[in-house]
Image (tube, rainbow, N blue to C red):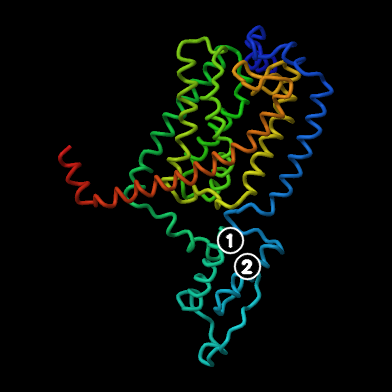
Amino acid sequence: MAKLLYNLAVKGVDYSIDGNGGPECVQFIPLWQRLCETLVFVPLGIYCISLAWDYLEWPQETRNETRIETEEKVYSESNKGCMAMNGSTCNNSSPPSPSTSNTLPSPSSSTVDTNIGVEKVASDKLDVLPSPLHAATHFAPDTTMTPFQQQLDDLRIWILGIYGMVFALEMIYKAMTNTGIFLANPCHQTTMLQLILLLLGKNNPRVTQIFRFQMYVMPGAFFALAFPILNTRLLIGEVFIYFVQHVFILIIPFYLLCLGGHYRPETYHNLAWPMFSMSIIVLYHFVFLQTVGYFTLVNLNCILCPAISDPLGNRFWRIAAFTHQCILVPILSKSYSYYGQIISSYLFAAHEEKGPEKIEEEDKKK
């Protein structure tokens, strides 16, 4: 079984093709340089992850002292009597009335409404969900759909099916050519993440962090389309599938942004998510791809030697690549999220201007 899997993964890799791998590719840079770069990038990636972790905007509030202090400041600014998230009672300017001091508030009372209202103020400023007690109440507007969103959501199963077929064809090509190891490349991992997002749906709170992370691996498709590596794709339709898959990688996030719900990016000023995501990508390349590629002689995502289409294909291509990627990828991701939400808002506005009656008339005419 192990031999069969190895044959499916590596046996068909042609090392004679430039940039595909082989001893010459492994020896493109000396071992000491490879180790030095690894010893710099790996600890740096781990440090950046630990630095960014406390500043990530999570779907549910994480209990720590920094967040509690921030919450207390938000509640003090609201000037309302409430029960704070950390369990302490806010000081009211006026004492409670005798009629309400000895009775427990009902779930429909104004006290609960006040708590929810103030808690929503805090969550808006922190870009996090309130406590689990009121999580469903807070997200009720997000989980409801406009007619336009309902139409888009009806297409989700079809998009999932077509996208899944494209990726299935890519896997079939890899199995036919015995080069399944290339499925470890980031673009294929991005496709898997996006298929999971489409499968889970907008109402699943788990998709928020997956969606935010894939926004920082998605820009790799821009570079793959700008500098395509096609000299290893020799079967009929293999080049076509390459472009279709990478176009899907670019358009799926916009579709998810239009669906709304839990498909939402972090706030624009947040730099923790770019730092966290890029650090994960760096570790994935230097720890996993480089190790696997070094022992199999396969140039996974150009970690062993530069691609033939790389304009910076010298011995320092890895330093140059990760430097400009750490600058360009966050810019591309933030810009995509910003303009994607603007365009989606125009689409919603245009759809609302038509109104349901005009849409029904157009459907009848068709």
Q: CA distance from mark 1 to mark 2?
A: 8 Å
Under mark 2, the amino acid is Glu
Seen in the picture, residue 257 relative to 5 is either above or below; the reply is below
Residue 126 occupies quadrant: bottom right
Residue 201 image offset from top left, x and y in percent: 46, 44
- State left or right for residue 235 relative to residue 38: left
The residue at 62%/10% (across/down) is 12
Q: Where's the N terminus, which quadrant? A: top right
- State left or right for residue 278 relative to residue 223: right
Residue 298 image offset from top left, x and y in percent: 68, 17
Residue 192 occupies quadrant: top right
Report the residue that reaches farthest toward the right: 32
The residue at 59%/70% (across/down) is 74
Observer-nearest of 11 and 346: 346
| Mark found first going from the N terminus, 1 or 2 | 2
Total label count?
Answer: 2
Report the residue that reaches farthest toward the top: 16
The residue at 49%/70% (across/down) is 117
The crowding category of the residue bearing disc 1, from other C-alpha atoms within 10 Å (few below 14, some 14 to 19, many at least 20), is some
Under mark 1, the amino acid is Leu
For the residues labelled 1 and 2, say whether their Cβ atoms are less than 8 Å apart. Answer: yes
Residue 293 image offset from top left, x and y in percent: 71, 21
Q: Secondary structure at mark 2?
A: helix
Residue ID for mark 1: 126
Residue ID for mark 2: 71
Observer-nearest of 104 and 354: 354
Q: Secondary structure at mark 1?
A: helix
Seen in the picture, residue 144 relative to 173 is either above or below; the reply is below
The crowding category of the residue bearing disc 2, from other C-alpha atoms within 10 Å (few below 14, some 14 to 19, many at least 20), is many
